[in-house]
Structure formats: structure tokens, C-alpha cells
Image: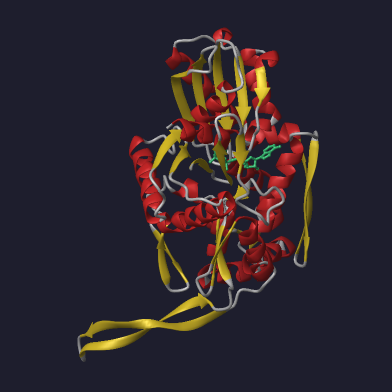
Amino acid sequence: MRIGLDFGTTNSSAAVFDGRCVRLLNIDPRGPEPAIMRSALFISRDGAPFVGREAIDRFTEGNVGREIEYMWRYIGETEVTLAEFGTVIQALYAHVDSNTPGRLFQSLKSHLRDGGFSSTDVFGTRYTLEQLIAVILRIVLQRVEAELGQRVTGLVIGRPVHYALDPAADALAIERMRRACEIAELPPFEFLPEPTAAAFAYASTVQREQRVLVFDFGGGTLDVTVMAVTDRGVTTVLATDGVPIGGDLMDRRIVMGKLLPHFGEGATLGPRRLPLPAILLDHLSEWQSIVDLTQPRYLDIIDEAIRTGNRPKELRALRTLVRENYGLPLYETVERAKVRLSNDRSATIAMHVPGIQFEEVLERWDFERLIGPDVRAVGACVDRALAAAGLSHDEIDVVLRTGGSSRIPCFVRMLAARFGAERLQEMDVFTGVASGLAIAAAQG
Ligand SMILES: Nc1ncnc2c1ncn2[C@@H]1O[C@H](COP(=O)(O)OP(=O)(O)OP(=O)(O)O)[C@@H](O)[C@H]1O
Ligand SMILES: [Mg+2]
């Protein structure tokens, strides 16, 4: 049996098509919606992998609110040559977090374009990025086969139109994803652009000739496809385009644009009123990089800032954020507020945990100000795709919105201004791509 697999930045899903109906597969039985699995991987200290909701829960239960303890650990030996003594063997020690129960990885797909992320040490075992992704893919394959009760004989896997704007980074990403699939020992697989897949899903439901623009806006990338659909559902891709802008970036804009004052931004230190080193708060731009601040050289600066700075409460909140691993809850709180802003005009971002207490009301207009440059870049991407297809806005019959971020009102307005609100249509935001991949897989 051939399946479609959408390995997303935030969420993944898989589906099969029997020639008439698409069936979504329950790849995350423990999740609130089993057909939509968070693309998260947790590796425990003893090397056991967990994916989806269970990965996030295990991390949250074991790591959050726990003081990270540093110990000098013996990590090996090295040869050093000293002038007086000649070559000697010297023991190597390092500061390591001694009691963390496991490591969590999210948004791994976004790292595919990042040449700097090659491998990471997980409790003494080196994992390349490709190996980490392969662990997720392998588990998903096993769950699919268990649910179907038969072997998967082939897959069509989604890919963004562009993982990265730079062609070299884009080529690197696609090659690494291919490698990850090989390491996972997937059955024969091929890639299909994600918005093209979404258009397939739509084409299977229409009976007239149409020109369609798919606007697939997820956690990591915006992907656009312009397609012609015939009355028998035959599709021709006229143009594709994409940019590495997505929901993760919107979360980051909120943290960096609104929340830093709660963690000491603007504090001055000592009698000479020196500014807090900017490098500290720069680490808050991703939840994964907050943990870097647990290194003693940064913690020393934070402790010094608490002692001598003029914002001790906020600087203590920074220390708690860092030392007790509240980075992920912070980002989850922000994400929830962002999602609420798609319905409400304002949302409160609140954290009430020992050591971190704040409430920040975020108005929708203020959020839109923070992401203004991104909205313009996304609009330009839509226009480029249309120009490449040789069409004007009024030659598009329907604009399909898919992907979670396509619900953000200012992007809906941006599309309505170009195409008219009556031509916009929302399709299954989290599963439209997987459905289309399944249809492509059945045909292939
Ligand atoms: N109602 C909503 N309003 C705004 N954003 C939302 C909403 N629902 C979900 N999101 C955001 O959508 C993103 C996830 O969407 P989706 O599952 O489509 O992405 P993905 O397929 O994993 O990513 P990609 O396709 O870029 O690899 C997250 O950033 C999430 O915060
Ligand atoms: Mg997606």
C-alpha cells in the first residue's frame, strides 16, 4: 500500500487514498487529534525515543521547573605536549547538566536548511540532524503499518517549494531530507511540493475548469502553487514559489518584540550603569537556544546582573527561565495567544510559575505591527508566483488557504485585497497536504 506523508515543521500527518476516499492515519494515538502529530522527538537519557505529544509531555514533566545542576564530569583523555615534560595524558573534564532526563527536539525540518547544524551530542551519542529526523520517520512508518495491517510499499512525501531562499541551502536541505528517509529505511519514496499536493486534494473535489492558487502557510514556510484544473480533475502546475516564513517566526516576533522587558531588557548594571549584554536576551529568540544560557559563563553574568542591576525581579525571572527550563512553556504560551488572536482582538500572554510572574496584553493591531515586514514578504511571494504563471489576480478562480498560519487575519486580508474575499476558501488546514500526497501516492 502506498501512502502520503506530510512531515511538517510543527505537525505531521499521513494518509491513504483508496480511489474514492482519503483516510487519515492515527500516527499519534496519544495526541488530542491522533491524525495530527506534533513533529517533536524526545530522547531519554538511556537513548529511548518518543515522538509527538508524548515527547512534549515527557520533556515538560521531567525537565521543566527543575533546577539544572552542573557537575564536573570526566569525559575522556587527551594527549598534551608540555615543553618540560614531553607528551602526557591529561584527563578532560567538562561542565555538563547532570540530571536532565532527556532532550527534546522540535522544528527539525527548519534546521535542514541550516548548514551549521550538523550533529549534536545526546547523552554521549552523536546524532546527525538526518539521524534525528530518521528516528521520527521510522516510528511513523511503524505506526502506519500497524494501523493498516500491511506493509507500506511506497511513499509520496511533501517538501516545501523552497526550504531556503539561497539555492545552495535549498539543495542541501532536500539532500539531507533524502538522506534522512534512507537512514529510516523507508520503502521507495518521492517528494512532491506541499502546495501542489494540497491542490491535488482540491482538484479531486471539483468538476469544472479552474485556476487555483494554493496558499499553504505552516510553521516553517509559506508555499504557493498556481495550478490549472480541468473539469475532470487533471492538474497542471503553472508556477510555484515560497519563502522561509512561518508560524515559528511569528512566535519569535512576539517574544522579541513584546516580552523582553519581563526578562531584564533595559536593565543597567552597577554604579556605572552598564547595559545588560545584548547577547543574553538574543538567546530568547528560539526556545531551543534559551538552554544555551545555562552555561556557567552566561549564568555568572546573569547572577552578577541580579546583584548589581536595577531590575532584580526581571533578572531573576531570566535566571528562572534559563535554569529551570521554562523556555518551551514560554513559547507555548505565546503560541496559544497568537492562535487566540486569530479570533479575538486581544489576547493575554501570562506566565505564573515560581519566579516568573507576568501578564502582557497583546492587541491584534500590535501583533500585526510586529509582523508587518513578514506580511509584505508573503504578499510579494504570492505576486511573484502569479507573475511566473503569467496570470493577473482576477484570472484566479479560487484561492485555497491551508496550513495553520493561513488563519491569521492580516494574511487573510492581504489575500482578500488581492483576489476578493469571495474567492478565498479554507481547506483542511492541518491535513490538506497529507490528503493530496495520499492521492498522488495512489496514482503513482
Ligand atoms: N488559528 C491559528 N491562527 C494562527 N496560527 C495558527 C493557528 N492554528 C495553528 N497556527 C500555527 O500554525 C503553525 C502550524 O501549522 P501547520 O501544522 O500547517 O504547519 P506545518 O505543516 O507543520 O509546517 P510547514 O508546512 O511549514 O512545514 C504553527 O506555527 C501554529 O502556531
Ligand atoms: Mg505544512
Compared across the picture, whether 17 is left or right of 423 comes to left
Q: Residue at x 70, y 63 (%)?
A: 317
On screen, residue 389 above or below 48: above
- Given residues 139 and 441, the one toward you in this image is 441
Q: Is residue 256 left or right of residue 142?
A: right
Residue at 49% x, 27% y is 196
Instruction: Residue lying at the far front in this picture: please name it.
Output: 149
Kindly indicate the quadrant of the structure image that contains residue 166.
top left
Taking depth in this image into account, of 39 and 169 the one nearest to the observer is 39
The quadrant of the image that shows the C terminus is top left
Residue 384 location, x and y as percent? Answer: 47, 19
In the picture shown, does residue 94 fall above or below 230?
below
Q: Is residue 207 visible?
A: yes
Residue 154 placement (x, y as % from top left) = 43, 43
* Residue lying at 70% horizontally and 69% vertically, measured from the top left: 65
Residue 221 pos. (x, y %): 52, 37
Q: Residue at x 59, y 58 (%)?
A: 276
Q: How many marks?
A: 0
State the scheme by which the image is colored: secondary structure
Position above or below: 405 against 422:
below
**Residue 156 placement (x, y as % from top left):** 45, 38
Q: Report if residue 325 is visible in the image.
A: no
Instruction: Give ligand 1's quarter of the image.
Output: top right
